Image: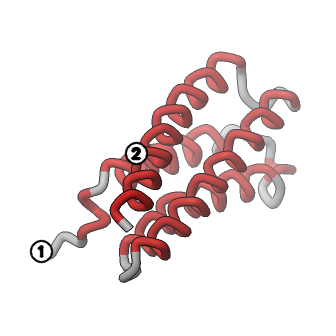
Amino acid sequence: MYTYSFEKLEIWQLSRELVKNIYQVTTDFPDSEKFGLTNQLRRASVSISSNIAEGNGRNSKKDKARFIEIAYSSLLEVLNQLILSKDLNFISDIILSDFRIQINELSNKLNAFHKNLLIVS
């Protein structure tokens, strides 16, 4: 089976892991949040990997870099929503801390990838 180039990217693989973890943790959110934070967190996390994949399919480095910027913005959106989830007692301090570590790693790698695209352009 053919493997597309985005599938080989570490940032895409890390973003997939984040999606999986978001889906797992949101299964414990209240039913009343099904169309609230649960949906928002899931959509924002999926957006990260989707934008990495879509950007990788672009021809110009400038276009690729723009999609990485969008992925980074979605990552910050996820962090914000996790902080709100903690404020609302949907997740614990430990879970938020674990996500912060994961988000920090992905953030650093997205920024490095973005800078590399701009240097190469």
- Disc 2 crowd, CA 10 A, few/some/many (<14, 14-19, 20+): some
Label 2 sits on residue: 14
Residue at the extreme top of the image, as rendered: 94
Q: Nearer the viewer, residue 31 or 107?
A: 107
Q: Nearer the viewer, residue 13 or 22?
A: 13
Residue occupying image coordinates x 87% and y 31% = 88
- Disc 1 crowd, CA 10 A, few/some/many (<14, 14-19, 20+): few
**Measured along the vertical axis of the image, is residue 40 above or below residue 106?**
below
**Residue type beneath disc 2:** Leu
Residue at the extreme left of the image, as rendered: 1
Please name the colour scheme applied to the rendered image: secondary structure
Identify the image quadrant of residue 8.
bottom left
Label 1 sits on residue: 1
Residue occupying image coordinates x 65% and y 55% = 74
CA distance for labels 1 and 2: 22 Å
Measured as percent of width and height from the top left, residue 63 is found at: 49, 76
| Secondary structure under the numbered disc 2 in the rendered image | helix
Which image quarter is the C terminus in?
bottom left
Which image quarter is the N terminus in?
bottom left
**Measured along the vertical axis of the image, is residue 97 above or below residue 14?**
above
| Secondary structure under the numbered disc 1 in the rendered image | loop
**Measured along the vertical axis of the image, is residue 68 above or below residue 60?**
above
**Residue type beneath disc 1:** Met
Q: Nearer the viewer, residue 28 or 49?
A: 49
- 96 left or right of 58? right
Measured as percent of width and height from the top left, residue 109 is found at: 43, 42
Measured as percent of width and height from the top left, residue 67 is found at: 53, 68
Identify the image quadrant of residue 45.
bottom right
Q: Nearer the viewer, residue 84 or 65?
A: 65
Residue occupying image coordinates x 47% and y 48% = 110
- 30 left or right of 97? right
